[in-house]
Image (spheres, rainbow, N blue to C red):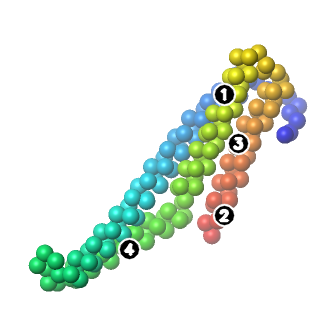
Amino acid sequence: MPNNNFKIDKVKLVKDIDKNIIFFRRISQNDKKKTTWIEVYKATAAAIATALLGIGQLKLFGITDDNYFQALAILITASLSIVTAWDALFRHKDLWIMHADARNKLVKIKQEITHAENTNTLSDELLSNFFNEYQDVWSNRNKNWFKIRESDG
């Protein structure tokens, strides 16, 4: 861990950690919602397109012209291709996991600071270690974000 040549402001550090826990929770939940909707849409669209093709081929419900079913199935699978490409580009699931992990690490640091305070063991050296861990969370998050973006092709 880097050696800080300055005194760490505990109040500022805890305030920054709290602010970033809220930030990571918000964006993590947002990416989780997007992931859920994308996955549900992909499964639903594939099932509906398959059912439409099947209905048209089986001549169910007294339908003799399957062109409408085929056309609708083509439109649905085309939209499925767009949503799949969107998902591959933005990778909301990877972002969701990355931000949830960062949030969890910040919660751990905050709990450790609180515990050290409550047991009267929070020294300047320990506070400096917590500050370095906080900076590492951000460094790792940024590195992971770039890895995700680089793999977009």
The residue singled out by tag 3 in the image is 137
Above or below — where is 44 with respect to 32?
Answer: below
Judged from the image, the secondary structure of the residue bearing numbered disc 3 is helix
Q: N-terminal of the two: label 1 or label 2? A: 1
Quadrant of res 104: top right
The residue singled out by tag 4 in the image is 78
Q: N-terminal of the two: label 4 or label 3? A: 4
Quadrant of res 130: top right
- In this view, the mark in front (3 or 2): 3
What residue appears at the point 56 percent right and 35 percent down from the top-left corner?
22
Residue 70 x, y percent position in the rendering: 27, 80
Q: CA distance from mark 1 to mark 2?
A: 34 Å
What kind of residue is marked 3?
Val
The residue singled out by tag 1 in the image is 111
Residue 7 visible to an observer of this rendering: no
What residue appears at the point 57 percent right and 38 percent down from the top-left corner?
23
Q: N-terminal of the two: label 3 or label 2? A: 3
Above or below — where is 67 with respect to 130?
Answer: below
Closest to the observer, 133 or 112 = 112
91 to the left or right of 135: left
Q: N-terminal of the two: label 1 or label 3? A: 1
Image quadrant in which the N terminus is located = top right
What kind of residue is marked 1?
Gln
